[in-house]
Amino acid sequence: MSVEPGVSWSERAAHLFPGGVNSPVRAYRAVGGEPPRLVRGEGAHIWDEAGRRYIDYVGAFGPLVLGHAHRSVVEAIHVAVDAGGSFGVTSPGEVRLAEMIRSRMPSIERIRFVNSGTEAAMSALRVARAATGRELVIKFEGGYHGHADSLLAEAGSGVATLSIPGSAGVARSVAAQTLVATYNDLSSVEALIEAHRDQVAGVIVEPVAANMGVVAPVDGFLSGLHDLTREAGALLIFDEVITGFRVAPGGAQELFGIRPDLTVLGKIIGGGLPVGAYGGRADLMDLVAPAGPVYQAGTLSGHPAVMAAGQATLAGLTPDVYTNLDRRTDRLASGLRVPDACVARVGSLLTVFFRETPPRNFAEAKVSDAHAFAHFFHSMLDAGVVLPPSQFEAWFVSAAHDDDVINATLEAAGSR
């Protein structure tokens, strides 16, 4: 269908993309209104097509931990692109980034780069099933691990935002391979393992839930999962697509002192370019082709530009950067005074929940006042602050959010 010249970007997009977007949460259905047409970013700020500047807490939903257009990341990408692109063989950049990741996450003895978090989570589960000879996987209500068929049951993120119970087009036989437990409730996991004895291949969990809004693990939850999976002969899989290299230099597994069998990564390790990875114990990862019988492949996996951006990002995450990130995010979280709301925070992730106390699971998160959040969202947008457009998403603070930016955010929220 042709589009008349002079129509708006949103009208043109509606003629081209389902719902006018290429990822559902971008449609602003949870908060209403039209998204700003953003054309440029630098540091903690973004600009729309009219030239208005905003403070950004979306950060591409997590990857831009150093901020927009960080010089070292941009220069690394330019060098990689100028060198010619992808060559269809293992590049030095893949080796260097893998070594950087392994040095920070010792649980990752072997790693495989892919192109998205969805691909990484799907592949990690394939490894778990192959290693154990079992078919069932336990996930948590509100946990989002990408849009692979078997992982959409009771999912968070955009699925929660649009109130979709799963997804049309997912076969019942595939959905039946996923069991759903309650986050922060070990007894719910124990009951599922007992009811399906010797059938559970693994438990996949966001060690800090960030797709129902930020929900921290209660004391003993992650260590309890570790013990339960060991006793059941199942694997523990940490989905650190969001938390990896954000909540600590070694991710949530360093922060909470837990060594998972497999880890799923994304976002930060690509420096803002499309990326994913899965890794873990050598004996498990050596099941992956061509070393073993678990098939997984990708034409553009480990693309040199992506690897270069990831290296530059990890190199920029110095101890001082983490110290400042933690201090400034704490200032923001403790300084926000939003009526009828509370703030949940872990590291440089936070969510303002419109309920009395921070939730402990998805059921509690879901009773937050989404209408009040939508009003707050638009008041902040009007004041020049862009937030993730859903009650069930995390705010992402970057190293570029300096004290002046934090002060301006608090002022916009009426907290100063």
Image (cartoon, rainbow, N blue to C red):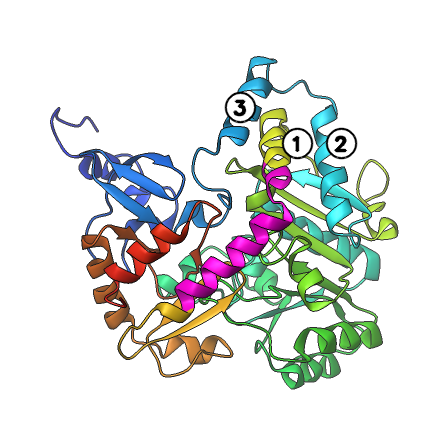
The quadrant the C terminus occupies is: bottom left
Q: Which residue is mark 2?
A: 95
Give the percent coordinates (x, y) of residue 412.
24, 59
Q: Earlier in the sequence, mark 1 or mark 3?
A: 3
Q: Residue at x 42, y 46 (%)?
A: 59
Query: Which of the two discs, 2 and 3, labels the residue nearer the N terminus?
Result: 3
Residue nearer the viewer, 287 or 183:
183
**Magenta span contains residue 330:** yes
- Between the residue at mark 2 and the residue at mark 1, the CA separation in whole angstroms equals 9 Å
Percent position of residue 35, x then y: 24, 47
The residue mark sitting in front, 1 or 3, is: 3
Q: Nearer the viewer, residue 280 or 55?
A: 55
Q: From the viewer's perspective, is residue 140 above or below residue 265?
A: below
Cβ atoms at labels 2 and 1 below 8 Å apart: no
Q: Please provide the residue range marked out in magenta.
A: 313-333
Element class at badge 1: loop
Residue assigned mark 1: 302
Relative horizontal placement of residue 165, taking residue 240 as reference (left or right): left
Callout 3: helix, strand or loop?
Answer: helix
Residues at marks 1 and 3 touching, judged by CB atoms closer than 8 Å: no
